[in-house]
Image (spheres, helix red, strand yellow):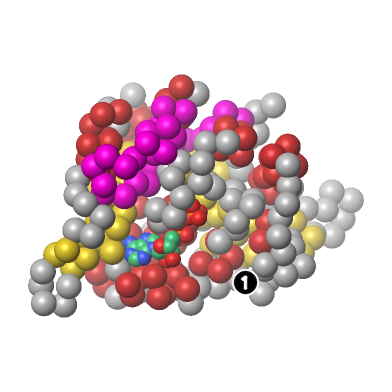
């Protein structure tokens, strides 16, 4: 069954690979889009390891239901974003989610369709790592406008990301492009240290014939802000805000180009 997303545009942030910064980039791009005046929702599709509530300072929040016969879950709100996550539905933030994949998929469907999102310009979806049932449901059953694929700079160790790109292309999800995260550490002395190698993002984009959306450096301040639940795109310094504003603008350009084609 096809699931209609509750927004004019739906953007999936995915990778295949774990720990590359999908959630960090998803919430910060969402925040940058909200700062452009768009009405933005964030769906945390990482039903086993939800991290969006912490990243957006909503860790203590629990989901509420609307009144009336067709009661729906009310999204939590912060930084101008409407947020829904399994993490908002569990008794504690560390409640383990020991689910078979069929249960995880129905939880995801429910988060998407039983939430009172209202009118959204953009729904940002943060995918879990891997290419399993949840990812397949997102790619096949949700009406996605485009996927943004996050990778790290290693030229070779990108098999998981390649698998994700292949899966998206096979089920014909438009790909807005590849973002390379953790691209070099800019030391205070002005030197740039390529701790995770160089060039992987552009190579990957070229290999699969998709746009390269740019690089984000290793930024210890960004990590600290994430841990505090304060997205750098809204609470960071000018440089951090500009980085995410630029990335959000490039993604919107790709969406506009895709519509013209
Ligand atoms: N550019 C960056 N600079 C510094 N730290 C970063 C950067 N991007 C992400 N991180 C940190 O790396 C860790 C992993 O990031 P994140 O949780 O966003 O990855 P993920 O791909 O969503 O992981 P998972 O696969 O578990 O969902 C976090 O601690 C985050 O703060
Ligand atoms: Mg994540």
Quadrant of residue 196 in the image?
bottom left
Residue 148 vs 257, above or below: the answer is below
Residue 56 vs 82, above or below: the answer is below
**Residue 148 sits inside the magenta stretch:** yes
Residue 158 vs 210, above or below: the answer is below
Report whether 25 appears left or right of 77: left
Can you give x and y, in whole percent of width and height, for residue 143 in the image? 56, 33
Image point (65%, 28%), residue name: 2
Query: In the image shown, does 211 or 234 lie closer to the viewer?
Result: 211
Per the image, the residue denoted by label 1 is 59
Report whether 210 appears left or right of 231: left
Residue range corresponding to the magenta coloring: 138-167
Image point (28%, 36%), residue name: 204
Q: Quarter for ligand 1?
A: bottom left
Q: Is mark 1 within 8 Å of ligand 1?
A: no
Can you give x and y, in whole percent of width and height, for residue 222 in the image? 36, 70
Which secondary structure, mark 1? loop
Query: In the image shown, does 5 or 151 lie closer to the viewer?
Result: 151
Query: In the image shown, does 37 or 15 lie closer to the viewer?
Result: 15
């Amino acid at each position: 069954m096809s699931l209609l997303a509750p927004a004019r545009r739906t953007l999936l942030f995915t990778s295949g690979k774990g720990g590359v910064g999908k959630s960090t980039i998803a919430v910060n791009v969402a925040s940058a889009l909200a700062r452009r005046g768009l009405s933005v929702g964030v769906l945390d599709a990482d039903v086993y390891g939800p991290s969006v509530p912490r990243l957006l300072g909503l860790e203590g929040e629990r989901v509420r239901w609307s009144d009336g016969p067709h009661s729906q879950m009310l999204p939590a709100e912060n930084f101008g974003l409407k947020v829904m996550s399994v993490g908002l539905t569990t008794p504690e933030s560390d409640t383990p989610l020991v689910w078979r994949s069929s249960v995880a998929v129905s939880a995801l469907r429910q988060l998407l369709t039983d939430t009172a999102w209202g009118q959204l310009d953009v729904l940002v979806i943060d995918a879990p790592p891997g290419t399993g049932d949840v990812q397949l449901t997102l790619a096949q059953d949700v009406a996605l406008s485009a996927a943004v694929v996050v990778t790290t700079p290693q030229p070779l160790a990108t098999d998981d990301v390649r698998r994700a790109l292949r899966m998206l292309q096979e089920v014909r999800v438009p790909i807005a492009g590849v973002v390379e995260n953790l691209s070099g550490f800019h030391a205070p002395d002005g030197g740039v240290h390529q701790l995770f190698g160089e060039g992987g993002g552009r190579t990957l984009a070229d290999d699969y014939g998709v746009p390269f959306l740019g690089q984000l450096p290793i930024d210890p301040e960004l990590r600290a802000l994430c841990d505090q639940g304060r997205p750098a795109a809204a609470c960071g310094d000018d440089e951090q805000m500009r980085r995410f504003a630029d990335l959000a603008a490039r993604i919107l350009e790709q969406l506009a180009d895709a519509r013209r084609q």
